[in-house]
Image: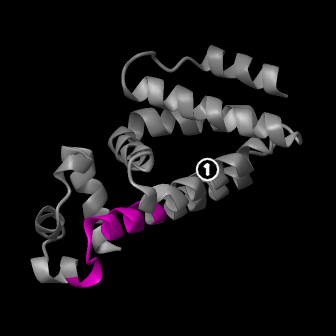
Amino acid sequence: MELLTATLAVIERDGVAGVSHRAVAAEAGVSLASTTYHFTSLDDLLVAALTWAADDLAAELHERVNEMGARPADELARLIEHCLVYRRGRTLAEYELYLLAARRPALRDAAAAWLEPLTQIARNFTTNPQKASLLVAALDGILLQSLIGARPYNQADFTALLTHLR
């Protein structure tokens, strides 16, 4: 896990292009040999980092789903704000890995697994599978647009989205 945490830290700081066995080893404070021993290729390292990030997100989202109670929309809005404000660097790193799957087939299964925790949350708002899938796609769009600065996060837009997809 130490190497995976270090990988995400490198991506936060330098982007995926900055990931190398040497950079991850330096970030983790371990020898270069230990990174290449555990992860023969960079794709192996990136797949493991994305899988670990998805599992970590799933655990965090599971906690939040249990806390949703009577006002799930408010909790989901808080979660989005948390991702964009308090863990922006981590969210950006995770999305950069997620999008890298478009170019690196080795990452595609891990990227697909990334959607499952979000889909579980979407099911709190609708029993219709198509609407749940559309909500996840819209959340991805909201997060990506906010991360690149194209559009500030607006809770009123989010509320309108939930109204349309229920």
Residue receiving disc 1: 115
Magenta stretch: residue 42 in it?
yes
Side (left or right) of 26 relative to 79:
left
- Coloured how? one colour
Residue ranking furthest to the right: 127
The region drawn magenta spans: 37-51
In the rendered structure, which amino acid carries the disc numbered 1? Leu
Q: Relative to residue 161, is residue 3 depicted above or below?
A: below
Residue drawn 64% across and 54% down?
117
Q: Nearer the viewer, residue 153 or 129?
A: 129
Q: Is residue 57 visible?
A: yes
Magenta stretch: residue 18 in it?
no
Q: Looking at the figure, which quarter contains the N terminus?
A: bottom left
Q: Nearer the viewer, residue 75 or 16?
A: 16
**In x, y percent, where is residue 51?**
47, 64
**In x, y percent, where is residue 143?**
50, 31
- Dominant SS of magenta comes to helix
Quarter of the figure with residue 136: top right
Question: SS class of the residue under badge 1?
Answer: helix
Residue drawn 71% across and 21% down?
161
Q: Relative to residue 137, is residue 59 depicted above or below?
A: below
Quarter of the figure with residue 84: top left
Residue drawn 13% across and 83% down?
33
Q: Nearer the viewer, residue 147 or 137?
A: 137
Q: Looking at the figure, which quarter contains the C terminus?
A: top right
**In x, y percent, where is residue 152?**
45, 17
- Number of numbered discs on residues: 1
